Image (tube, rainbow, N blue to C red):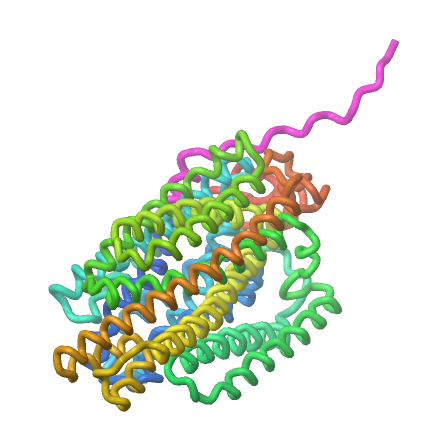
Amino acid sequence: MATETGPPASPAPPAATWREWTALAVLTVPLLMAATDMTVLFLALPAIAADLAPGSTQMLWILHVAEFLGVGMALTMGWLGARTGRRRLLLMGVALYGTASLGAAFAPTPEVLIAFRALMGVAAATLTPSIMALLRVLFRSSAQFSVAVAVTMSAFSAGMALGPPLGGVILEYFWWGAVFVLNVPVAVLVLIVAPFLLPSRREEVTGGFDLSSVVLSTSAIILVIFGLQEIADRTAAAAGAPLWPYVVSVAAGVGLGALFARRQLRLEDPLLDLSLFRRPAFSVSVAAVMFMLLAIGGADMLLAQFLQTVQALSPAQAGALLIVPAVAGLITGLLPPLLVRWVRPSIVMAGGLFTAAIGAAVMVWALPTGNTALIIATTTVIAAALGPLFTLSINLVVASAPVSKAGSATAVGDVGGGLGNALSLAFLGSLSAVVYRTTLQGSELSEVPGGAREAAEESIGGAAAVAESLPGAAAAELTRAADAAFTTAVQSGYGIAAVILVPTAVVVLWLLRHVTLDDTDGTGDTGGTEGSGGAGDTGGTDAAEVADSPGGTRTGADAGASHPA
């Protein structure tokens, strides 16, 4: 008697070979390079200022222009990679990054340096979307993909941790341009090795180049981030600084963003598929990173200033101490592939957010003690708690999208992180400036002249400069009051961070409670909640892709042979 049987089980995704793992090592190098540049520049700014004599506004552009363009171009690059090929776009970005770094190293004027930094930002926008999309091709098993993402994000954390000590060593023996020259041999190495290890694939083009969407998305993101960062800078600089031009910038960016979203809903082949936001694994993960950076980005900035002003540490000493929390975040960022074997991602992510909130609350108590060891230890706990969040969030973001949209999905994560960081600088930066100024105004400064007191209220750095020009008793009085006021300001930043992190943890715990990272057969949804057509679009949906890998290796249909022959 015949019995009915269900559909045949889908074959397990092919395991990665040594070639894929070697390719992963290559893919971490560009991120390590870009991440190091994010922190090494802080130490190089004084030397740049002494050599090129830029104005205050030019200094801000030197520091921020790459971030503006990197985040602003992320969506465009994520979409473009699907048309030109992920590997091709990555190599173009690495080549541009190395060339622009060489130009920045020998820039004769601030304007030239700003121009080359802008090119570095455009190049950086190609990196993360291309790398994450390539990982989705190289590692078909979701378990191995989770490990690959953890390694990649840890490389980014390692680069940020490496920046301060590396910059200190370089600037000790070479001129400031050497921090940029270091990128050139790294870029050359990637350009030589990558073509032999990375798959080359170009998704089937279903639409033309939509210039309107590119202009709308880029303009919206740049206007919002530019406006928010300038609001933070102007508020911190002076109580009466004009803010309305930058408020207008933010409003214009929001308006253009609304037009962009409306256009995407009407296009058959949009620059950004807004349907991705219907998937909790995608939308909640993007929001979690944004709110996490909103909570902690400004607080970390304030802590770096606190160590150098109130604690009177040199930049090198402060940078060395901040390596400890960076390394802690690096280590815990590697743990999610192990943790999710026993608990769901929502528990890991929410647990980290709750722990970080407790750490932020402890920081409010620890800062007035002046105990540097206690402060660094608490910061280390916060960093370690949030380390897995980066890895799991990008894992869920990429895994929630089909392979053909992995780059665009990652770009949305980049934009969310950039907005969170900019919002943090705007709100926590403004709040700390107001708290500092108000607290100092309420201090008893009988020995300090009125003019000196007003100058000291501008910033903690201004107070230190004023104190140097005052006689002993007045200088000591002003220094004590300014240190106490800035300590209160940093406390307020961490207090707000704790308030933001707790509800974020609750939302993550609830909305992602059913999401898992189980292996799929290439047709399901790695997110576990969306059904077919989600993360698992790793095999059959890409059978029509065009492959031009070395040796004629096909990609897409034969998912296991995504590397060159």
Q: In which quarter of the image is residue 120?
A: bottom left
Whether residue 116 is visible here, answered yes or no, is no
Answer above or below: position of 217 versus 317: below
Answer above or below: position of 11 versus 399: above
Q: In this view, does 275 lie to the left or right of 136?
A: right
Pick the front one: 367 or 276: 367
Position of the N terminus by quadrant: top right
Pick the front one: 149 or 45: 45
Pick the front one: 89 or 375: 375
Q: Position of residue 463 (x, y in %)?
A: 26, 78
Image point 56% across, 44% down: which residue? 555
The secondary structure making up most of the magenta span is loop
Image point 46% across, 62% down: which residue? 126
Q: Quadrant of residue 166?
A: bottom left
Magenta-colored stretch includes residue 14:
yes
Q: In this view, does 562 lie to the left or right of 539?
A: left
Magenta-colored stretch includes residue 378:
no
Position of the C terminus by quadrant: top left
Q: In this view, does 352 lie to the left or right of 12?
A: left
Answer above or below: position of 190 versus 197: below
Q: Residues in magenta?
A: 1-25
Answer above or below: position of 399 versus 77: above
Q: Where is residue 7 in the image (x, y as percent from the top left)?
A: 76, 27
Pick the front one: 369 or 279: 369
Image point 40% across, 51% down: which residue? 362
Total marks shown come to: 0
Whether residue 111 is visible here, answered yes or no, is yes
Image point 42% across, 85% down: which residue? 239
Q: Where is residue 214 in the image (x, y as percent from the top left)?
A: 59, 73
Judged from this view, the residue extending furthest toward the top is 1
